[in-house]
Image (cartoon, rainbow, N blue to C red):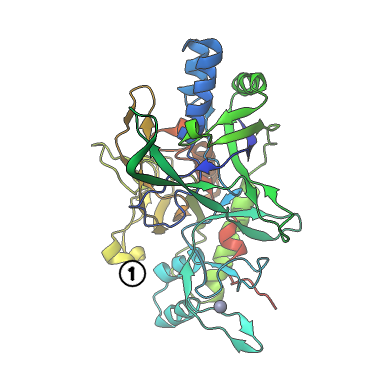
Amino acid sequence: MKVYPIHAILKSPLAVRRDRQSNRSHAADAVVGTVLRGALAHLYLEQKGDADETFQRLFLDDSTCRFPPLDPGEGVLPTTAIACKRRPGFVAEDLAHGMADQLWPRIADSVARSPTVRDLLSSGRQCNHLLRGVKCGADMKNLDGFYRHSGNGSYRRAQLRTVVATHVGIDRVSHTAADEILFSIEAFAPQQLGEKATEGKPTVLYGRLEAEDDVAAELRNLLTEEQGILYLGHARTRGYGRARLTIGEPMANQDPYAGWQEWSDGLAKYLAEIGAGGLDGEPFFFSLSLPNGAILVDALLRYTLDLAAMVDWLPPLPDPCQMDHVLDLPPQSLEGGGTIRCLTAVTGHERIRGWNAAHGLPRQDEWGVTRGAVYAYSFEGTAEQRIRLLGRLETLTTAGTGLRLNEGFGRVVVSDPFHMTFLKQERTT
Ligand SMILES: [Zn+2]
């Protein structure tokens, strides 16, 4: 499968339904892959009338097509991202005190045995931004959401303006306003405000579609028939969710190995610098991130947060009560040589809800892994064994993990450069 960047320009407000049970405030501020797949499948049935073999290939086979979530930005902030409690955000944003990432310090924390390293790490939880020569000093808090790269290499959070519209219920018998029925719909505004009131920009949502060539061509044909217009989300009969969807040209394949090695070397250097050694030999470090979240189940089909339940060569997460003693646990041996340990993980559950259009009923809730979850591991072995590990990692990035892959869940990113770039809090001065 190739990766196709896609974007949707909103032509009317897009209703977003938040999950009140979610513990991450922005978790629902995106259109899940399930909704995109449903909208395109609806187009297909309208145009062709029948769920034939091509329909199966387009919408039901995760080895030929995977529909991504549509997000306000190209990137999802990892669960390890932190920012000043008083002025959160990247430095490129107005008045923000800069972003930092806690993955590497957390790894240092789990492998170090000396208390001095601990003190060093807790100081990273205070904002280092200088205000007229004085350190801000406010707490750094976890920050979730999405980000966008701008042309000059800087990052910005991507937040969309939402609007709330109040509607009057209509009596089904009399077709007049119903008594005591008033409801409101929260939606992404089709226009974002510019610097001046007259400079509104259209709202754009981003995604990355994975598809075979013929599948992408077929999806493009479906859209061309409708001049690219698609209806997404809830309240479509009230005019919500009209969007123009474009499937771009496939992205070029890049050799990932160099980046992974740089990440591992960078982390080894950082650990040596702060005196948080403790791992024998020259381990190869890597992290696994789940930017789209995932639905992981164990052998008994119970929901789990542990990647090891689905990827048999990964070691299980350490017992959270014994996080201090990661190095005292025996590492797991890999088939084909070498050993591997789980160093740390920042993950959480997210309830995944859905609607089954064919049955006209809500889908059963599932408990998935939250978007942006991160897991970190170290590997010990000979150069040859390491090459075998890299092969395994590459397979994991193309295959993904968990259930409902063609709705965008379970995409895996190895050694996200975000953790390296934001190791130190960004400086505004
Ligand atoms: Zn601050």
In the image, what residue occupies the spot 37% across and 57% down? 23
Horizontal and vertical percent for residue 188? 55, 47
Q: Which residue is mark 1?
A: 324
State whether residue 300 is above or below residue 279.
above
Q: Is residue 48 left or right of residue 293?
A: right
Secondary structure of the residue carrying numbered label 1: helix
In the image, what residue occupies the spot 52% across and 60% down? 282
Q: Is residue 399 visible?
A: no
Q: Is residue 272 left or right of residue 250?
A: left
Q: Nearer the viewer, residue 305 or 288?
A: 305
Q: Is residue 164 visible?
A: yes
In the image, what residue occupies the spot 33% across and 27% down? 173
Please state, as top left, top right, bottom left or bottom right, where the N terminus lies in the image.
Answer: top right
In the image, what residue occupies the spot 54% across and 36% down? 241
Q: How many residues crowd mark 1 within 10 Å: few (<14), some (14–19), many (20+)?
A: some
Q: How many marks?
A: 1
Q: Amino acid at mark 1?
A: Asp
